[in-house]
Image (spheres, rainbow, N blue to C red):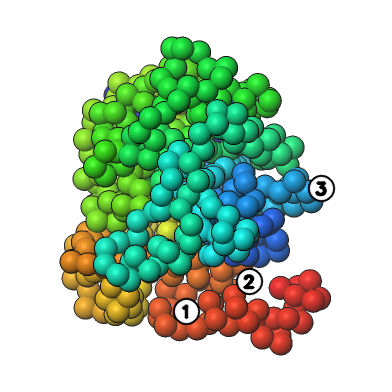
Amino acid sequence: MSNEYPPDDIDLLSSPVTLPNGVVIPNRLAKAAMEEGLKGGLPGRRHRRLYRRWGRGGWGVVLTGNVQVDAAQPATPHDLRIHDSPHTVPLFHELHESLLADAPDPRPLTLVQLSHAGMQSSATYSLTRAPWVPSIGPISGRPSVGTGFVAWAIERALWPVAARAVTNPAEWCEIAGKFVDAATAVEDAGWSGVQLHSAHGYLLAEYLSPLTNPHPRPLPGVPERVPVRLHLLWLILTGIHTATERTFVKALKINCSDFVAGGLDEDASAEIIREIVRWRLVDLLEVSGGTYGNPAFAEMGREALFAHFTRALLPTLPPAPEGPAIMLTGGLHDRSLIARCIRSRAADLVGIGRPAALQPELPVKVLLNRALGKGKARVPPYIIPGSEFYRRLLGGGKSRPHSKARNGFRETNGVVARRDEGNGIKLVGAGVSTVWHEWQMARIGRGENPDPTLDFLRGALANTLWHDILGGGPRGWYRHWMGTD
């Protein structure tokens, strides 16, 4: 199929993709969803500054970070949320206008990622409900953050009470309705569409997985032909399809594997995806892997993670626009590598996450820049200064990057190979890198430029302590009072 594509890599990456609903994505590069690390709730000035920078970047798709459909059950205090408030639609509209304000033509597809944290929602971390009010999920329990006493204590601190199992089908229908209501609010705000986050152990993924939903029950109004494990997703997709215009894009992010005992293996995930594609309700499908509860994504190279899955499944799906466009995210930060991925039909689009926190204009400045030849049109490896020390200090195990780094956590196109050694907190390694990139996005939100030399300790003091907890001191308080922060 390679003769269907332009021979020039930049021409290929700049070529459009037509979705099943007729909407055209202008190029093959997507700014993937990342939590922005800014104040949660409704979008504000700092969100608008950040998204304006991404809008200038020449992306084909721009995805928001988590936007929670249940304001009382977010994943973190930084999550944006859909509120039952008259300010919700106007503020999301302002965010969308900021994104497009400086965007080059043709403008990007703009998607809001809708999510429900499920069992992972922590009352003591998010501070959106009383500590004794549990999170919800298909079963009762707590997410696992690791082994040993420290991990046990952290689990009890984050989740003082175990998640409440949702057993009433009417409550599941109510949850589906929250996704539909959120999608209609997003459409009213002018966005191109939504992406349902059914990956990484959030509620929609918990409903799919035999590990967290061992005995799924049928939900009312779903045809018998739909597998019972897919009932919640079917209700949400059909609800959005009915409530919005045909050109409103419905995207889905789904695990290719949970990588946990009792979870969905690749074959089961592949069959789930085939079934979803048969519904003809999804326009864009992003493939992910792993769960935060057992983060195999932090222990394996993404190339190995996707290799079997893309070879075995994606070529068997109808190509866009007969079927959904396929987006792969993770480890693809090189122009030539992205082009090979598309030509082999491993994907139609490539999602880029963390590098976009350091280079928000990555497409126009690097990947689509003809002044940069082969070997230069890529995100070079970089180190998070000081991260290895804090990773070991906090018990997250040792990083094993492909290229050795004595005092840092190296990000590479091949992706870091990470391992847990003995007892420890499984999420620390992934968390160190995640938080550092959130600090970069927070800098952009404050009107500053990203700083790749930012030491982890300095970042913790400057961003978490000074800006997040102390509000930037007297100067920050004054700017906030004047409305110029």
Residue 410: x, y in percent? 29, 68
- Callout 2 secondary element: loop
Q: Which mark is residue 459?
A: 1
> Which label's residue is closer to the chain start, 1 or 3?
3
Q: Residue at point 47% right, 22% down?
A: 218
In the shown orientation, is residue 289 left or right of residue 442? left
> Which label's residue is closer to the chain start, 2 or 3?
3
Q: Which mark is residue 447?
A: 2
What is the three-letter code of the residue carrying label 2?
A: Gly
Up/down of 60 relative to 325, above or below = below
Q: Which residue is mark 3?
A: 86
Front position among marks 1 and 2 = 1
Work out how far the residue at label 1 is from the one at label 3, CA to CA, in angstroms: 36 Å
Would you say residue 364 is visible in this rendering? no
Work out how far the residue at label 1 is from the one at label 2, CA to CA, in angstroms: 16 Å
Up/down of 165 relative to 87, above or below = above
Up/down of 428 relative to 129, above or below = below
What is the three-letter code of the residue carrying label 1?
A: Gly
Q: Nearer the viewer, residue 131 or 329?
A: 131
Q: Residue at point 45% right, 25% down?
A: 217
Residue 482: x, y in percent? 81, 76
Residue 211: x, y in percent? 33, 39
Q: Quadrant of the C terminus?
A: bottom right
